[in-house]
Image (tube, rainbow, N blue to C red):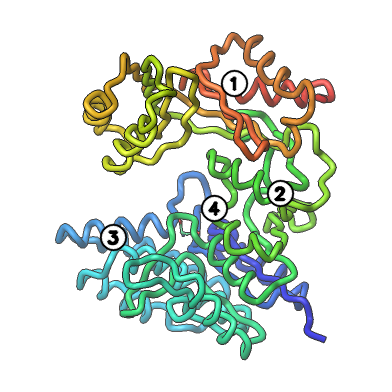
Amino acid sequence: MVEDIIVAKFGGSSLANGTQFAKVKEIVTSDSRRRYIIPSAPGKRNSKDHKVTDLLYMCHQLASHGLNFDEVYNIIENRFLDICRDLKLEIKIDKILAEIKEEIKDGASKDYCGSRGEYLNGIILSEYLGFQFIDPKEIILFDENGEFDEKRTEIQVKETLKETTYAVIPGFYGGKPNGEIKTFSRGGSDITGSIIANAVKSKLYENWTDVSGFLMADPHIVKSPKTIEKITYKELRELSYMGAPVLHGEAIFPIKNSGIPISIKNTNFPEEPGTMILDDFSEVSYVGTITGIAGKKNFTAISVEKTLMSMDKGFYRKLVSVFETNNVSIEHMPSSIDSVTVIAANSEIGSKLNKVVEEIRIYCNPDNIVCYTDMALIAVVGRGMIKTRGISAKIFMALAQAKINIRMITQGSSELNIIIGIKNGDFEKAIKSIYDAFNKNGGI
Ligand code: ASP
């Protein structure tokens, strides 16, 4: 019988120094099913510290302007030398560091530079654990345009790991057919872990971090929010897309079809249960209440009014094409009979706003356009909450009592969430009052 496999990804804070490496070793070796380990680059050791990935990007930026980056690179070198010294490892990390420095000097790409933190941490961790090192540039495959190639990757990972019982595979990057390095977006080691878990059909994908699971709300806004014990993929996707940290918003996709559960665990307190992320059909006990609240600031709402809009057959197509040709992603589009509001992130539309509005005017011939550039969106997520009487009433009552004016409401068609648009300035107060409505005095 083939033994169950666990894929374990360790985040940057779990591998920030020698002490953290020792905790990771303890965790990995305490269960022989933990066979494939995905490390991030060293993260912050304290709030004033720097993430190695940020320092590497800084080196690239300086080098690409022909500026000296010795000072920044020294900090990186010392981080890795300290880790090797603390762990009493005899690998020639100084030599590898010197080679990387030369590459950066010679104009290495941004992705190459950004990925070296994971690469170096992978080499160190594999040596420390006695596991094989596998460079993801050989198995996490991107095409020549830099798009992730899911099919080829799955075949390659399966093929390579068939022969390998224990391996460390750095997160965050892979390779293009011409051998160039390509990274995922920031925090992408979570995606690597998920890809590996899917390819080897692991029993469980563990994501080890520095918090004991997924919290119901941002702890910077709500004091000691409750931990979510169980959550489905879809709910998590909604929450992480809307800004809840912990797991990369795209980490669900590779394992979605295999239904592999993800366990979010705390490297510093491994005995704590953390959060279990389950497939969407799993039985969960909290149907009828909310699972979590997340949100993001800085959106623009463009409201377009036109009498008899619904009779104008090509209206929506024309409107959407203005956003498409300006390369602006649309977040939401709530509508009524004679008006529609398009909501886009300020980071997307920013300086293009006047141009977009002008083009809507020319192309769609509306009666009126009103822009509102100061909007925050809050997602209240919970499986089954939409079908349960009283939940949305409770949310809106909480906002009314906090004297918060709601500018927009949309209910996701997944029946999983309610999105509320408010003023940026009301953001924190809104999250706090919704959280309290469900949790203070026993909640619902
Ligand atoms: N080190 C990369 C970052 O800081 C990727 C990761 O940690 O997952 O974004």
Which residue position holds label 4? 248
Q: Earlier in the sequence, mark 2 or mark 3?
A: 3
Q: Quadrant of the C terminus?
A: top right
Q: Under tag 4, what secondary structure?
A: loop
**Looking at numbered disc 2 in the image, what kind of residue is underneath it?**
Thr
Which residue position holds label 2? 232
Q: Quadrant of residue 57?
A: bottom left
The front one of 131 and 376 is 376
Q: Earlier in the sequence, mark 2 or mark 1?
A: 2
Identify the residue shown where x is 50% and y is 17%: 407
Query: x, y percentage for residue 189?
Result: 52, 62
For residue 240, above or below residue 266: above
* Mark 4 crowd level (few <14, some 14–19, many ≥20, 10 Å Cα): many
Q: Circles 1 and 3: CB distance less than 8 Å? A: no
Q: Residue furthest bottom?
A: 163
Q: Earlier in the sequence, mark 1 or mark 3?
A: 3
Give the CA separation, mark 4 to mark 2. 15 Å
Ligand 1 under 8 Å from disc 4 Cβ: yes
Q: Earlier in the sequence, mark 4 or mark 2?
A: 2
For residue 63, above or below residue 32: above
Say the numbered circle drawn on residue 262.
Answer: none
216 left or right of 351 in image: right
Give the CA separation, mark 1 to mark 3. 40 Å
The front one of 165 and 369 is 369
Which residue position holds label 3? 59
Identify the residue shown where x is 59% and y is 9%: 403
Identify the residue shown where x is 64% and y is 40%: 414
**Looking at numbered disc 3 in the image, what kind of residue is underneath it?**
Cys
Q: Earlier in the sequence, mark 1 or mark 4?
A: 4
Q: Nearer the viewer, mark 2 or mark 3?
A: 2
Which residue position holds label 1? 430
